[in-house]
Amino acid sequence: MLSSDRNPAGRALVFRAAGHTCALNLAHVVKIMRPLPVEPVAGAPDMVRGLSAIRGVPVPVVALGALFHAGSAASGRFVVVRTGSRQIALAVDAVLGICELAPSVQQAMPPLVRDAAMGAVDAIAALDSELYFVLNAARIVPDERWQPLAIQEP
């Protein structure tokens, strides 16, 4: 199940969001951090909590739980991802670690956006195609695949 080579493209950050275990290609991840204060933005879609100042730069914060109709409860971590020339903080419940996934295993897992609320997915696709690309590349890790993975601390 695990990739035998050390190809960085197969390394994934494993995290929890709204009861889902998810894997995101490590190439998209800039940093993992404790949540910072968030300033709401008027008129933003429900899944956008607002802006957070990360190293002095305002960064949009997207609550991944809201993609699954889980509301926007307090998150345990921010996963800052690169979307083109910008960064976006994904508010997640917990970061579990890093693992290596063989490309065949990763492709067999359903995309994160498959279980997401369609209205939320449509809004992301319309507002930010680069974020949609990152989330569409993320995978949901089914329980039967999760248990045998060798997870390392991030």
Image: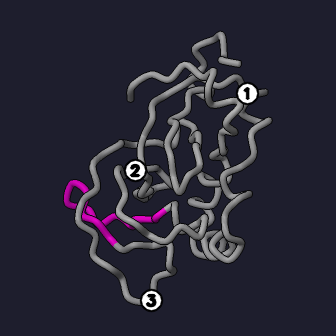
Residue 24 colored in magenta in the image:
no
Residue furthest out toward the bottom: 43
Q: Is residue 79 above or below residue 65?
A: above
Q: Residue furthest top?
A: 4
The magenta-colored residue range is: 51-63
Residue wearing tag 2: 80
Looking at marks 2 and 1 on the same chain, the residue that comes earlier in the sequence is marked by: 2
- Kind of residue indicated by mark 1: Pro
Residue under label 1: 103
Kindly identify which numbered label has been placed on residue 89: none
For the point 57% across and 14% down, the residue is 6
Whole-angstrom CA distance, mark 1 to mark 3, is 39 Å
Q: Residues within 10 Å of mark 2 (few under 14, many from 20)?
A: many
Q: Earlier in the sequence, mark 3 or mark 2?
A: 3
| Residue neighbourhood size for the residue with mark 1, other residues' Cα within 10 Å, grouped as few (<14), some (14–19), many (≥20) | some
Which residue, given by chain and number where applicable, does mark 3 sit on? 43
Left or right: 81, with 127 as reference point: left
Nearer to me, 26 or 22: 22
What x and y, as percent, mark residue 42?
A: 38, 88
Quick one: label 1 or label 3, which is nearer the N terminus?
3
Mark 3 in CB contact with mark 2 (< 8 angstroms): no
Left or right: 2 as drawn, with respect to 131: right
Q: Amino acid at mark 3?
A: Gly
Task: Name the residue type under label 2.
Answer: Val
